[in-house]
Image (tube, rainbow, N blue to C red):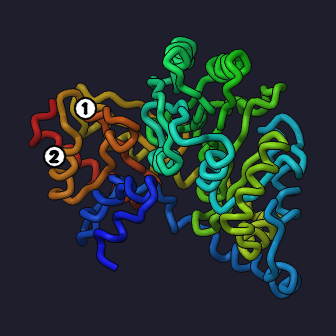
Amino acid sequence: MSEKAWQDLYSQVGASLKPSPIRELLKLTKKPGMISFAGGNPDPAIFPVKEFAEAAHIFAERGQEVLQYGMTEGYEPLKSFLAEWMAPKMGRVTQSEEMLITTGSQQVTDLFCSVMVDPGDTVIVEEPTYPGALHTMRNHRVRFLGVPCDENGMQVDLLPEIIGKARAEGQKIKFIYTIVNFQNPSGTTLSAERRRRLLEISVETGIPIYEDDPYGLLRYNGTDEPTIFSMDTQGMVIYAGSFSKILAPGSRVGWVVSPKEVTRKMVMVKQGVDMCTSVVAQAAVYEYCRLGYLDSHLPKILDHYRKKRDAMAEAFKRVLPSNAVYSVPEGGFFFWIRLPGVDTKELFYKAVEKGVAFVVGESFYPYGGGSDTLRTCFTFAQPEEIGEGARRLGLAISELGGK
């Protein structure tokens, strides 16, 4: 069949699909000697390989069980562990019927959209926000309403006016998507005051909150803020977590906690997607946790990444122009930098010539924006590379006229 014939048969989603702008640009970063501040990858040097291998002994003991099809809802021992382990953050021990184990936390976005949105419905997002979530939501043909962020996260007080105007135009707003801790890409954390106000607005307007929290356990300094879920008494919040950043992304194990009926709906959608998340992966993750390795590993991760964050902060202090706007994140993976007067897409190509890569800011906006911003990740580069990568970035900025 010809390419034209296939084109005529594609669905609206299939016909409109576009490659990830981040991944397309990252193809240019593969040359030898490149220092990457681009992809938001954990450092494989800190992966608990030995401990995870030990946890795999569960297959010798329970192999006939874990090599079989599993329940769509998830591996019950893992769910029970998470319910207890996350109780301090969640404000209570959540019930099994509220929790679904997913194939990575990004699947939560896909399942929740399947349950909640029809083509043309609206989702409120932070600007900037995680492009993976934008990509998934676009596959569901949603419209976006962006809310600006500052150093304290989403500017929640803008929401009533934004919501009122959109509803007056006939838009159906289905949920508010927020990355509450050390946001990707901005590195900001939504303040406790704004979390409370966001929940109030959610209750007042009847618009639920999707609280995405893949980085919340990676705090290097400062004090944890309460989850929005823990404040919720009306069933307005769903909460998503992941093992990708606290264990390893190759595990592909995430989870979501939501009102029982919403969870049940997502379970039914998941049954038609992949039947269940890999029981092999779930069982290995559970055994790793049961043996106490997750609790003993987290302090090592925090120490490892804190040093890298500090190294990047020191390097940027030396090399970035005086008008650069950024703050040192208290956790997570990312620095978000604004360079007034600099087109960061043009800067990207100049930086690649110098042997350093980052992600241009416009990738994080649903409808464009952030042309003078960029994101750098400090977790993947090795310590000795961070200073040199920052030096190369500084050179590229200066050659483009950055002050």
Q: Position of residue 385 (x, y in %)?
A: 33, 59
CA separation in Å, label 2 and label 1: 14 Å
Instruction: Tell me if mark 1 has few (under 14), some (14-19) or many (20+) residues whose alpha carbon lies within 10 angstroms of its own.
Output: many
Mark 2 or 1, closer to the camera: 1
Q: Decide which of 201, 325 is in the foreground and name it.
A: 201
Residue that badge 1 annotates: 339
Residue that badge 2 annotates: 395
**Is residue 347 visible from the viewing direction of this image?**
yes
Tell me the quarter of the image containing the C terminus: top left
Q: Decide which of 87, 173 is in the foreground and name it.
A: 173
The total of numbered circles placed on residues is 2
Q: Position of residue 59 (x, y in %)?
A: 80, 83
Q: Position of residue 383 (x, y in %)?
A: 40, 57
Q: Is residue 292 left or right of residue 390?
A: right
Residue 298, compared with residue 167, is above or below; it is below
Q: Residue at x 83, y 85 (%)?
A: 63
Q: Position of residue 144 (x, y in %)?
A: 47, 33
What's the residue type where badge 1 is placed?
A: Leu
Q: Decide which of 164, 38 is in the foreground and name it.
A: 164
Q: Is residue 296 left or right of residue 191?
A: right
